[in-house]
Image (spheres, helix red, strand yellow):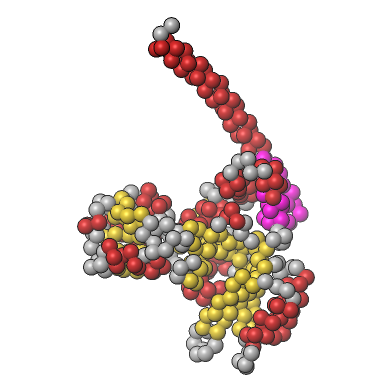
Amino acid sequence: MTEKQEISIEDGAANKTISVIRERIDSIDNQILLLLKERLLCAKDIGRLKNQNKRAKWDPLRERQIFERLKAMNNNDFPEPPLISIFREIITTCRLSQKTVTVGYLGPEATFSHLAGVKYFGQSARFIPQETIEDIFHDVEHGRITYGIVPVENSIEGSVTSTLDSFIKYRVKICGEVNLAIKHNLVNFSGAMEDIKMVVSHSQPLAQCRQWLRKNLPDVPTQTVFSTGVAAQMAQKDHTLGAIASSLAIKTYELQVVAQGVEDYRGNTTRFLLIGRRSLTRSGKDKTSFVLSVIDRPGALNDVLHILAEHGISLTRIESRPVKGEAGKYMFFIDLLGHINDPVIDKAVMRLRETCASFEWLGSYPQLEETDN
């Protein structure tokens, strides 16, 4: 037998083995599909029962228990982040089959807010672009959309002030949070840097790419627009413009990449909040947010912090915003660990209401898992 014949026999055996394994994969895929369809039917049955008993469709405790059980069963055999992502898509799709959900985001299509919404809900929700962050709050408050996804802080540039100001103005509740790693791309129609006569984007991305732009496009002016999606739309129509936009915008608006990763610092992450008309029940691992103002006297803010410390409550964030039209007065946004229905949080809140000049509970919602970041 020649060497060529031996190789041919080995190739044939390998191809036969591959064929058998592929048949097994097809069989597994078929079983997965049948089980997904069965799971969806079960979710719809639960939805009908909840309607009869007027129970909330979203049960954060139940979802957390599912994820914890799956992670324990998995024992790290399947990579955990994609496992959680896959099952979040499945769980969300089944939950949303019980009720049509609309989600407002800062549009147009392919903004980072849009990406954050897809990360949270998967592809199952109906996403509705809005012109401004305040429009999202307005439409949630008035029931025109079910939820809104809004940026609240960036790891480099800090808080998104329009979101904080809208929490003061509108009566909505925080229902969840999601972190999105931000990767900025400089894009235009041709893909050639020399064609760019102006760079457009939202104010936050422009600030996050300031040093890169100064070094690589020192003589090119910048212009602030409502969102990265608007910037991408403009670059699609005006071929002298470059836009700082998301990876999704490249495909959506058929643009070319001039440079990837143009942010000045790595690890750039934006925290987004999900807002709705009602807060959620306890998941067992929650976070709670307040906005309050203090009485105008020395040590007033310290009294607030002392109350929280006395009850052993951990703060994760505190942020101040000036009260519009009242010089020298501030509102304080506070995030802490726990749910409003936890006895220790409830006791602390009773004392805060007595101590503060104003106090507003913004919502309690499930904490991010490490794999969500």
Quadrant of the rendering where the C terminus is positioned: bottom right
Quadrant of the rendering where the N terminus is positioned: top left
Q: What's drawn in magenta, residue-wise?
A: 39-67
Q: Residue at x 52, y 90 (%)?
A: 328
Give the x, y percent position of residue 73: 70, 42
Please state if 245 lies on the left or on the right of 140 as rendered: left
The answer to if 9 sits in the magenta stretch is no
Which residue is more in the foreground, 39 or 152? 152
Residue 353 seen: no
Which residue is more in the foreground, 7 or 200? 7
Q: Residue at x 31, y 50 (%)?
A: 256
Which residue is more in the foreground, 145 or 65? 65
Give the x, y percent position of residue 23: 56, 23
Residue that sits furthest to the bottom in the current view: 297
Count of picture labels = 0
- Give the answer, above or below, for where 8 lies relative to 106: above
Please state if 198 lies on the left or on the right of 347 as rendered: left
Q: Residue at x 78, y 70 (%)?
A: 343
By secondary structure, the bulk of the magenta-drawn segment is best described as helix
Residue 141 image-quadrant placement? bottom right
Give the x, y percent position of residue 209: 36, 65
The answer to if 41 sits in the magenta stretch is yes
- Give the answer, above or below, for where 10 lies relative to 78: above
